[in-house]
Image: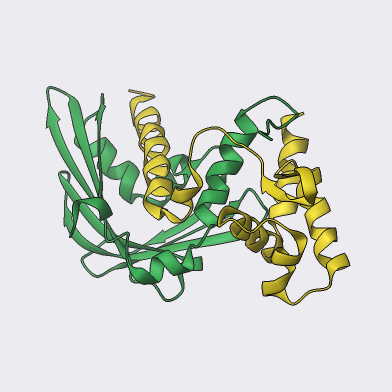
Chain colours: A yellow, B green
Amino acid sequence: MASDRLSITFAALADPTRRAILACLASGKASVTELAEPFQMSMPAISKHLKVLERAGLITRGRKAQWRPCQLKAASLKEATDWIEYYRRFWDENLLNLKCYTEENL
Amino acid sequence: MSPTDTIIKEILIHAPAERIFDALTDPQQRVRWWGVKGRFQAEYMESDLRPKGAWLMRGMGMDGKPFTLRGEYRSIERPQLLEFTLLHSWQENASPTLVRFELNEKDGSTMVRLIHSGLVTEESRRSFQGWPWLLEQLHTYIEAVPAKSETAE
């Protein structure tokens, strides 16, 4: 059910450490050691976060225990910090909303 | 203003400019259409519609976290021009962005031009590190139906 998936994924993303882990993965860090380093967290603590992300389907473990973000369609990771892209899509939808709203009841 | 830090969009709406201007400026109406399905919903807005007047909008994001958008009106020329600044609550120290709506009515239909500028500053890049990408990926991820994620080895 889409909404359950959404809850699980949002719960995974609700934590700032996990969001930062995803950002690290986007920049190429892959091993648990590399990921743990910036947070100065214990391995078990980091592993716990990684499990949550994995369960949410956001990351996957390849060979040699290297983690990587799951391949999601569209947007390249390089556009990760492109705020403009976010707003572009926001306006596409928002303008359509404005159109539907103002055209009805006329 | 470099071309890459400005969004320009146009949409033709089959409604008079006055109607659209009201939808943009009347708080009761604004909260009814402003938002992104499945991502966030505007719930409340207050607006002091005059140059340098403040506006504020509150809503709830999908993650259950409330958000606030605020800004100031710059130009108000009913019904053809509306310009205001816009700042997210999680954009604490960034400079506000500028949103401009140009309404051009002809034969009962209106061409609406949206210009959103001032988006790319060093501060905003830093504040939004990763977050908008995550929202986008989440959106696309949810749309992507298959429960198993595809990975390349």
Position of residue B29 measured from the top left corner of the image (x, y, whole percent): 41, 44
Judge by depth and name the residue closer to the eye, A62 or A41. A62
Q: Residue furthest left?
A: B106
A101 horizontally vs B59: left or right: left
Please name whichever residue, A3 or A86, is drawn nearer the observer in this view of the structure.
A86
| Picture coordinates of residue B110, whole percent (x, y) | 19, 30
Image side of residue A55 versus residue B125, left or right: right
Q: Tell me which corner region of the image, top left, top right, bottom left or bottom right, holds residue B72.
A: bottom left
Residue A101 in the image: state x and y as whole percent.
40, 32
Q: What's the residue at 70%, 58% (across, down)?
A: A14
Q: Is residue B21 visible?
A: yes
For the point 55% across and 60% down, which residue is it? B67
Figure quadrant of the N terminus of chain A: top right
Can you see residue B89?
A: no
Residue A81 place in picture, x, y as percent: 45, 56
Please give left or right for residue A13 compared with residue A55 in the image. left
